[in-house]
């Protein structure tokens, strides 16, 4: 079991270098504040969207859209990572609660990061390459805000995390979970068609797409793998380019701890 968790990116000890709660570009307190601010922003954005959807009578359909589910993942990530970073920055200083939690929860945390690093990019590509309809998207103020928030800003937020965090490359085995997640959503889409009478996305309708449907399904699945590889190597590149900055921060942190210890001994 330990070997399985190691393959999934959960090793013992877990994150001794504190990569999950630090940034090469920001001090720990600033990074905690940024993550919590983004957590609050994305939560408010999602709640407003749900409330307006409920007002129009379609609240149950809200959770049938891949765009909305991936956005909920972003909300979850910023709250989970923000709280852990805040504990590290303002309370524990040398660690954070997730390090002591069961391995399964650590795995879920790392897998959550993988999903939010990949799925919003898939949403971005599919929406603007396949589903884009200017008449609908820019029909009114709400539609404009909804499209920008759910199909552009989401990717900007994730790109920020990928570039400015210290999180290492996702384990290769996580690609399997990305494909499984896409397959599960496909099932949800057809359950929605059977239970609520509509297709969440027009390209999933076999009556109109015919042979193209298989191409869309396979293409999006392969696209998920391509996006995973792309994001993984962006992280690899970031790790290499910021190694000097991270080492400098580690030296500064070690010096600060020594000063605190020395002052305590002198006292």
Image: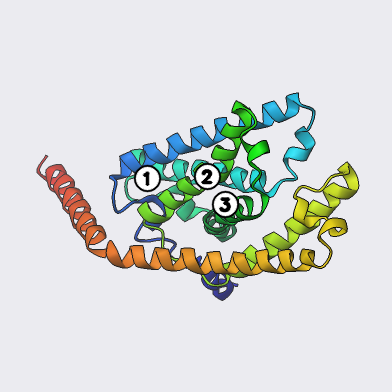
Residue 154 position (above or below residue 51): below
At a point 69% along the width and 60% down the height, the residue shown is 182
- Residue picked out by circle 1: 88
Between the C-alphas of marks 1 and 2, the distance is 30 Å
Tell me which label, 1 or 3, sits earlier in the chain. 1
Q: Looking at the picture, tell me which residue is in the foreground, 29 or 198.
A: 198
Q: Which mark is residue 21?
A: none
At a point 58% along the width and 73% down the height, the residue shown is 4
At a point 74% along the width and 28% down the height, the residue shown is 54
Q: Are marks 3 and 2 in contact (CB under 8 Å)?
A: yes
- Label 2, secondary structure: give it: helix
Q: Are marks 1 and 2 in contact (CB under 8 Å)?
A: no
Residue 46 shows in this picture: no
Residue 200 position (above or below residue 173): above
- 150 lies left or right of 194: left
User: Furthest-top residue in view?
Assistant: 55
Q: In x, y percent, where is residue 29?
A: 32, 40
Q: Which coloring applies here?
A: rainbow
Q: Looking at the picture, tell me which residue is in the foreground, 43 or 134.
A: 134
- Label 1, secondary structure: give it: helix
| Screen quadrant of the C terminus | top left
- Residue picked out by circle 3: 124
Tell me which label, 3 or 2, sits earlier in the chain. 3
Between the C-alphas of marks 3 and 2, the distance is 7 Å
- Residue picked out by circle 2: 152
Q: Looking at the picture, tell me which residue is in the foreground, 226 or 246.
A: 226
Between the C-alphas of marks 1 and 3, the distance is 33 Å
Q: Crowding near pointer 3: few (<14 within 10 Å), some, many (20+)? A: some
Residue 248 position (above or below residue 38): below
């Amino acid at each position: 079991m330990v070997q399985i968790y190691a393959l999934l990116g959960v090793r013992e000890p877990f994150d001794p270098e504190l990569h999950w709660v630090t940034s090469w570009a920001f001090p720990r307190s600033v990074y905690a504040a940024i993550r919590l601010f983004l957590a609050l922003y994305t939560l408010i954005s999602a709640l407003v969207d749900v409330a307006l959807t409920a007002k129009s009578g379609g609240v149950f359909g809200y959770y049938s859209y891949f765009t909305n589910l991936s956005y909920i993942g972003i909300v979850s990530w910023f709250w989970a990572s923000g709280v852990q970073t805040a504990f590290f920055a303002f309370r524990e200083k040398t660690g954070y609660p997730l390090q002591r939690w069961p391995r399964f929860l650590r795995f879920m945390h790392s897998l959550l990061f993988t999903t939010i690093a990949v799925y919003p990019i898939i949403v971005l590509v599919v929406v603007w390459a396949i589903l884009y309809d200017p008449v609908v998207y820019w029909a009114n103020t709400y539609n404009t805000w909804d499209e920008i928030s759910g199909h552009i800003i989401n990717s900007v937020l994730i790109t920020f995390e990928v570039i400015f965090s210290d999180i290492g490359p996702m384990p290769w085995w996580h690609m399997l979970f990305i494909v499984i997640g896409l397959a599960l959503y496909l099932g949800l889409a057809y359950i929605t068609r059977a239970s609520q009478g509509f297709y969440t996305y027009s390209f999933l309708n076999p009556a109109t797409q015919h042979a193209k449907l298989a191409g869309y399904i396979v293409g999006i699945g392969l696209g998920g793998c391509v996006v995973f590889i792309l994001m993984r190597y962006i992280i690899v590149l970031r790790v290499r380019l910021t190694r000097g900055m991270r080492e400098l921060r580690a030296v500064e942190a070690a010096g600060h701890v020594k000063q605190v210890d020395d002052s305590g001994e002198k006292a």
